[in-house]
Image: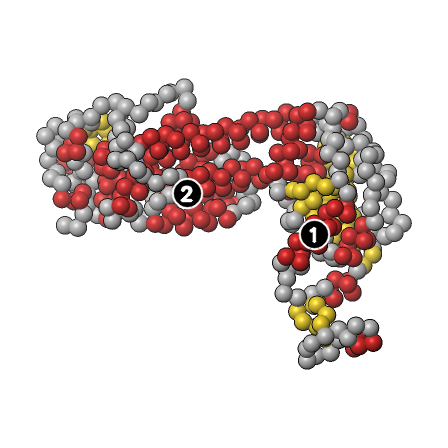
Amino acid sequence: MSSEASMLPHAGRRRRRTRLQHLTGLAPPAPELLDGGDWQVENMITGACTAMNDSAGGTMRAPFGNGPNALELQRHELAHVMISPKGVPYDWSKPLDTSIIRSVEDVRVNEFLTERGLPPPIARVGFGTKTLFDDYVEGTTENPTDLLLVAVSVLGTLRGEQIVDELYKAEASSKSVVETFRRGIELVRARPKRRESWRSDFARTIALASQLRELLKKWEREEELQSNVNWGSMEIFEPALTRTVTRLFRARKFRATSDGSIPVNPLRLYTDGYVFAIRRKHKVVQPTILLDASGSMHLPNVALIVREFPAATVASYSARARGGTLRILARDGRCVSATYDDTKFGGANVIDGPALDWLAQQPAPRYWISDGVVTEVDDNATERAARACAIKLRTGKITQFRQVREAIVELRASSRAR
Ligand SMILES: [Zn+2]
């Protein structure tokens, strides 16, 4: 006999046996030994968190028998009986609050088991859970709530930590969903340590649950604000990128040096003696620069940006009353010709929101060059449009500058730091 649960006698004083149990003869867990309560014990293959009832006793659902899977789930349920309080306030008008409390309480149950050398080795990833996780990795999660709560409840199991690490790295879903999910996991991982007895320590579950609740509510409020803004429709235009700066692009993979064995640049002997090349140690920066080309802003020379940062993507946008166009002006070391006319698309803002959504999906670092005056359809500058854009900057990790040259100064500094 290797575990606590398997040593418990199987005949409870007030046990009611189910028909299935009689048929299979598998041993059920015995929660009544822990609290003396009146328990209904049901054989259930996946288990379902119990024990948070109004008084002693209740219904425990867990797989019967003493196979390793069954014991693991029985232990989890029995741990609830030992440390989760009775009569947890359950407000049926706020089911979300109750779900959060249950998920966070599972983290504490896992801590309790780990302290006793019984960490659940494998998080039970059922079909529904797997679908939630797959959707997130594939980028189709639109609401982070269910994902976050399930991920939280597997934290503290051995394999669960790995699964959550992998989810933490995924970033295909919308930026606001990713931000909220990551923040939630960080909150749980940074939770304070236990200081009280396990039972009174339930206060820690309540504190963490209310932090998660705030986070999810904030996400809901911001989503609602975003959906209320009446942006114009946006299309993307890709003019021919006929100017090439390939020579410079190639040169930047190497750094000129006066010390080396292969002279690659002999003409430099006559200038600065830097005839050798070493491979650049720092990563080539791949910035994306989005230019607000509305009437208030004037377009800089795109070729100047590309010459210095050949991997940069540069786009501009502007609109008329109901909608506008985002133009790709440079990409992969090529840019529009010197005679390209970018002024024919209207001088209004109107599509700042969709343009920033586009920017958020491009390679980082991401810069938005704008005076920050944003408008909805009919070039209507509103407070909610401004707030929606502020949220997009935060979740999309976008830096705003008023002038291109400010972004270039920042880019130079960050490429030297690499
Ligand atoms: Zn549980």
Side (left or right) of 108 relative to 343: left
Q: Could you say which is closer to the camera, residue 252 or residue 61?
A: 252
- The local secondary structure at tag 1 comes to helix
The answer to which image quadrant residue 100 occupies is top left
**What kind of residue is marked 2?**
Arg
Q: State the image coordinates of residue 212 (x, y, percent, origin top left).
A: 44, 33
Direction from residue 52 to residue 137 in the image, left or right:
right
Q: Which label number is shown at residue 189?
A: 2
Residue at the outermost top position: 93
What label sits on residue 310 in the rendered view?
none
Residue nearest the viewer, comparing 28 with 384: 384
Element class at badge 2: helix
Image quarter (top left, top right, bottom left or bottom right) of the C terminus:
bottom right
How far from the left and from the top, in percent, is residue 134? 47, 44
**Residue receiving disc 1:** 411
Tell me what residue is drawn at x 47 percent, y 29 percent.
214
Q: Is residue 162 left or right of residue 169?
A: left
Q: Quadrant of residue 127?
A: top left
At a point 68% along the width and 54% down the height, the residue shown is 413
Q: Residue at x 81, y 50 (%)?
A: 302
Vertical position of residue 123 compared to residue 38: above or below: below
Q: Amino acid at mark 1?
A: Leu
Residue displayed at 32% across by 39% down? 194
Decide: few, some or many residues near mark 2? Use Cα within 10 Å; few <14, some 14-19, many ≥20: few
Tell me: residue 7, above or below residue 101.
Answer: below
Can the viewer see residue 178 in this picture?
Answer: yes
Q: Is residue 110 left or right of residue 395?
A: left
Note whether residue 62 is visible: no
